[in-house]
Image (cartoon, rainbow, N blue to C red):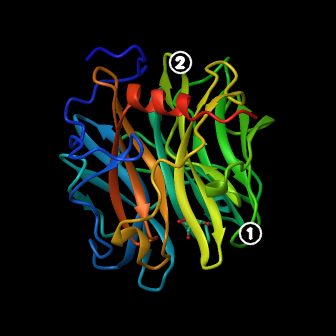
Amino acid sequence: MSSTIKIIGQSIPNLPWEDRKEPGQTPVWRYSQNPIIPRDLIPTSNSIFNSAAVPFEGKFAGVFRCDDLSRKMILHSGRSEDGINWNINHDPIDWIYDDPTVNKSEYAYDPRVVFVEDRYWIMWCNGFHGPTIGLGYTYDFEKFHMLENALLPYNRNGVLFPRKVNGKYLLMSRPSDTGHTPFGDIFISQSEDMVYWGKHRWVMGPREAWESTKIGGGPVPIETSEGWLVFHHGVLTSCNGYVYSFGAVILDLDEPWKVRYRCKTYLINPREPYEIAGDVPNVTFPCAALADAPTGRITLYYGAADTVTGLAFTQVEELFEYVKKHNTEK
Ligand code: BMA
């Protein structure tokens, strides 16, 4: 079927994929073999979740949140032939940095990875007198360079766009507090050099019940002929604690702080056993998406119950149709 909505991006012929087996309530479905990454894949890991994968040299590479057995949150790199079965380095990423002040990283979690211009950029929640947005890069997933934190504490869910827009790099973020933040809107900051970030723009705040406590960016935005496709997580505070689901919005291509369509319903919410039971029950938290332009297929990596990692799939045209049909007016 030829799609009227085009993904502007690369072809990933070996995209991890599984056709939908039965109809569902939303246009996103889970991989039948979930979770793809068990909590103890490496000897030192308590849990491996909220992690990022990208196509790399015809295969796949990624940066993984591996909380260790002392429950420290640490980033490790990994490689995969098929995007499903991963070899994660047993040693954490050993960052190269110029200014020793920069390496004051008390903890690191929830990485995102994106290829921009000539290298793979990594953003994560970095402990620097409170959580903020860490920034680094690699060319080869062997050597990793850490730069200055992009923003001041307190901030989480830093997500770079895959290209400059109107001459500026764009970074989504979610200002927060020191703890389990009970609020949160998404903003976009702009930079000419990946060092100084300003011209902050408000994008959106919580709206529907499933995301009524706070929202935050998920995978790197996907460019399409109709706007930037952004998956975001949303949190509901139930009488039993936080519930993390995820949904989607379509942002304006030239001014991405303008929301074109916003899906009223979640796309995935915690309901499978590995999503509702784990170190933090009831969490589905996407941090990466692979988009295959020729077919419109999108594969999402998401953390489940802060313990393991799963895959979910969608198709761009079906997704846009659903988002537009369930669009919420401001
Ligand atoms: C958020 C982050 C995520 C985590 C979620 C649920 O504040 O710490 O990494 O998945 O809480 O615990």
The residue lying at 41 percent from left, 22 percent from top is: 7
The residue lying at 33 percent from left, 58 percent from top is: 310
Q: Nearer the viewer, residue 290 or 59?
A: 290
Q: Secondary structure at mark 1?
A: loop
Q: Is residue 255 visible?
A: yes
Categorize mark 1 by other alpha carbons within 10 Å: few (<14), some (14-19), many (20+).
Answer: few
Which three-letter amino acid code belongs to the residue tagged 1?
A: His
Quote the CA–CA distance across marks 1 and 2. 40 Å
Q: Which residue corresponds to mark 2?
A: 226
Q: Position of residue 326 (x, y in %)?
A: 56, 35
Quadrant hosting ligand 1: bottom right
Q: Is mark 1 within 8 Å of ligand 1?
A: no
Tag nearer the camera, 1 or 2: 2
Image quarter (top left, top right, bottom left or bottom right) of the N terminus: top left
Q: Is residue 156 visible?
A: no
Q: In the figure, is residue 149 to the left or right of 137?
A: right
For residue 234, above or below residue 272:
above
Identity of the residue furthest to the right in this view: 199
Q: Nearer the viewer, residue 26 or 11?
A: 26
